[in-house]
Image: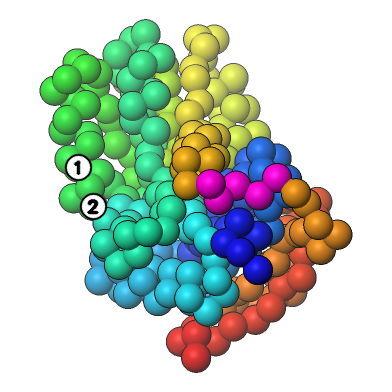
Amino acid sequence: MNNVTHPIGIFDSGIGGLSVLRHIREKLPAEDLCYFADSGFAPYGEKPEEAVVGRTLEIARHLLESCSCKALVVACNTATAAAVHLLRQMYPGTPIIGIEPGLKPAASITRSQVVGVLATERTLSSSKFKLLHQELDSSTGVRFIMQPCPGLADIVEKKELHSDRAFELVRLYLLPLIAQEADTIVLGCTHYPFLLHVIEKTISESTEKTIHIVDTGIAVTRQLVRVLEMQNLRNTQASANSGIYAMTTGDTSILEKQFKHLLNIRPTVAGVPANLK
């Protein structure tokens, strides 16, 4: 088997990366996708940075070496900010795509020059994110309002997408941004697109102004396609066995239900120990 037919690894602390997987599946239908949910260690956004780095390196090794993935998508903002630079040093010949909060596209479309950023505390405090923020703040004149969202990713993990708690938290984090004239909102965590219905309803109830939502999963997919084509790694010949395979350090039955609930698909899901031994 040559590298072209090897799978693409997609990794997140839980199910948030499924919001990225759905875009990849749409644009690269012939590719095998291997999804890793580290649900047994989630959420990453409230963990110490060194713990996130350790988990990211271990899971990347598992996907790239044990599972022979030809490319890796780190579909987690927190893990990207903490460790994607280390992964690229360790695997220099492998396409490694990180997910970034969409500050650049947000700066290009805002008219009020105010952008709200919803993200985990760990993402917002990372040195990688701070450098990007400072660079754009000085070069664009856009004011970025950073809003940490503790508990919001957990709502998605628990499948409480239509709960009162989901609406309560979204209002708590989003309304202050709207009050400060933000006309563009960045979803800085891969879990948050699954709460888009709550976000849009909250916006419609609080203002008549048009507010743009930036979901970086689309940009990540475009970058993945570009890199695969550049390195002649894109698979365009689907086989009868092409599909999605998933593994989790959490409860396999929960991940199976989340795939069905969020994407309406039923992949094979395997359980793996937290130490990946």
Image coordinates of residue 76 in percent, x first then y, are 44, 54
Residue pictured at 42% horizontal, 21% vertical: 184
Residue type pointed to by label 2? Ser
* Circle 2 residue: 126
Q: In this view, does 239 lie to the left or right of 82?
A: right
Q: Give the magenta part as a residue range.
A: 232-236
Main secondary structure along the magenta-highlighted residues:
loop
**Nearer-the-camera pick, 139 or 118:** 139
* Circle 1 residue: 130
* Count of numbered circles on the image: 2
Residue pictured at 18% horizontal, 25% vertical: 137
**Nearer-the-camera pick, 2 or 186:** 2
Say if 246 sits above or below 111 in the image. Answer: below
Residue type pointed to by label 1? Lys
- The secondary structure type at the circle numbered 1 is helix
**Nearer-the-camera pick, 126 or 100:** 100
Residue pictured at 32% horizontal, 60% vertical: 92
Say if 174 sits above or below 188 in the image. Answer: above
State the image quarter where residue 177 is shown: top left
Structure colour scheme:
rainbow
State the image quarter where residue 143 is shown: top left
Q: Is residue 241 left or right of residue 226?
A: right
